[in-house]
């Protein structure tokens, strides 16, 4: 098979946090039927994602999101990468955030059967490498829920 040509990537993510973002996005879609995060800032120490929701969430709902993400991470799901034509990918992933100049072949990142997303970023090999997901704060303003989070006890080690 010919090696696909992908768009250049302009940043280097911290793989555990980037993988946690994928799990959080899938969790929000499954629990609240909202789109994946429309605005995210993913960093090693702490990160944030914004979700379009019609109402603020109660504290018990925030706790349930955190619990659900941690259950997925603890399940030690494999993180795999595959390639497919954009037309085929459109049947399994949301392509609304793709840039206009996105490649005809897309890189699809799967987290077990829990999530599939077009992504060119760095990820861990399985979810147990992420550690524990912790929502450190949240706020709601005019249809936008912002979740700020960090990782604790992350066992992932960069290849040396």
Image (cartoon, rainbow, N blue to C red):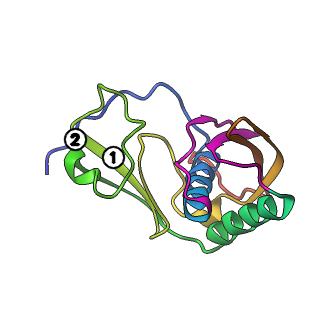
| Left or right: where 29 falls relative to 50 | left
Chief SS of the magenta region: loop
Magenta span of residues: 32-57
Identified at 55% across, 54% down, the residue is: 124
Q: Which quarter of the figure is the C terminus placed in?
A: top right
User: Is residue 44 in the magenta section?
Assistant: yes
Give the residue drawn at x 61%, y 59%.
32
In front: 83, or 31? Answer: 31
Regarding mark 1 in the picture, which secondary structure is present there? strand
What residue is pinned by disc 1?
107
Q: Quadrant of residue 74?
A: bottom right
Q: What x and y, as percent, mark residue 89?
A: 28, 52
Say few, some or many: other residues with alpha carbon within 10 Å of mark 2 (under 14 / 14 to 19 / 20 or more): some
Inter-mark Cα distance, 2 to 1 = 9 Å
Q: Is residue 27 left or right of residue 96?
A: right
2 and 1 marks in contact (CB < 8 Å): yes
Determine the residue located farthest toward the left in the rendered image.
Answer: 1
Percent from the top left, x then y, of residue 57? Answer: 77, 54
Q: Provide the residue designation for mark 2.
A: 4
Rendered position, 11 above or below 64: above
Q: Which of the pair 5/35 is nearer the observer?
A: 35
What percent of the width, then of the height, locates residue 118? 39, 46
């Amino acid at each position: 098979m010919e090696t696909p040509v992908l768009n250049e990537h302009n940043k280097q993510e911290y793989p555990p946090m980037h993988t946690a973002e994928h799990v959080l996005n899938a969790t929000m879609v499954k629990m609240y039927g909202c789109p994946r995060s429309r605005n995210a800032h993913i960093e090693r120490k702490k990160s944030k994602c914004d979700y379009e929701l019609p109402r603020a969430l109660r504290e018990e709902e925030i706790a349930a999101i955190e619990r659900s993400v941690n259950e997925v991470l603890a399940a030690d799901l494999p993180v795999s990468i595959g390639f497919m034509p954009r037309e085929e990918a459109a049947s399994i992933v949301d392509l609304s955030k793709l840039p206009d100049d996105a490649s005809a072949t897309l890189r699809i990142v799967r987290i077990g059967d829990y999530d599939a997303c077009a992504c060119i970023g760095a990820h861990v090999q399985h979810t147990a490498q992420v550690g524990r997901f912790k929502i450190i704060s949240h706020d709601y303003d005019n249809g936008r829920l912002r979740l700020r989070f960090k990782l604790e006890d992350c066992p992932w080690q960069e290849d040396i």
